[in-house]
């Protein structure tokens, strides 16, 4: 092998070395972009697990979960499911502490709406009423 070939090989190794160092940075940047929270303003109402508020079992959520007072969960309208608020998605609701988990769906007539579960506390649900809130969540890896 002559001197020029060896010099060229060194250049390739240096470039390849740079690329190998850059790949983890590029992956990290892609992952950071994927975890940017989605935000949206929605109408939020409240609901309880009482027979008077449903035509079925008041403790049974749409995906089969059992509702129990004290749970921080929400129901979402169908259009929000299509936006990435799928079963098990954790949501932050501006003005409320903690994270709420999507485990229930609302009737198809609703759009851009969430329903916050308030156990059996009808007074708390009535006090909440209906209002606009900002929600945020991170898209799951397998969502579009």
Image (cartoon, rainbow, N blue to C red):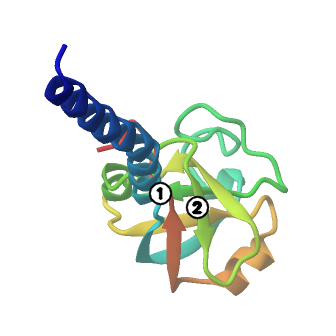
- Say the numbered circle drawn on residue 81: none
Kindly identify the residue that appears in the image at 47 percent across and 57 percent down: 32
Q: Nearer the viewer, mark 1 or mark 2?
A: 1
Alpha carbon of mark 1 to alpha carbon of mark 2: how far?
18 Å
- Is residue 106 something one can see in this rendering? no
Residue of label 1: 32
Residue of label 2: 91
Q: Residue furthest top?
A: 1
Q: Position of residue 93 (x, y in %)?
A: 61, 73
Against 110, is 90 above or below? above
Kindly identify the residue that appears in the image at 81 percent across and 68 percent down: 121
Horizontal side, residue 140 vs residue 104: left or right: left
Q: Residues within 10 Å of mark 2 (few under 14, many from 20)?
A: many
**Secondary-structure class at tag 2:** strand
Q: Quadrant of the C terminus?
A: top left
Residue in the foreground of this view, choosing between 22 and 135: 22
Horizontal side, residue 41 vs residue 1: left or right: right
């Amino acid at each position: 092998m002559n001197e020029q070939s060896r010099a060229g090989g060194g250049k390739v190794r240096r470039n390849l070395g740079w690329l190998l160092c850059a790949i983890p940075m590029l992956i990290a940047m892609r992952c950071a972009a994927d975890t940017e929270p989605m935000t949206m303003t929605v109408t939020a109402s409240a609901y309880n697990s009482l027979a008077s508020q449903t035509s079925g079992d008041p403790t049974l959520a749409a995906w089969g979960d059992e509702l129990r007072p004290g749970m921080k969960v929400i129901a979402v309208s169908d259009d929000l499911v299509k936006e990435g608020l799928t079963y098990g998605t954790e949501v932050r609701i501006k003005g409320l502490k903690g994270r709420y988990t999507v485990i229930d769906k609302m009737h198809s007539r609703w759009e851009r709406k969430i329903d916050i579960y308030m156990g059996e506390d009808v007074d708390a649900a009535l006090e909440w009423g209906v209002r606009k809130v900002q929600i945020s969540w991170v898209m799951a890896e397998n969502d579009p």
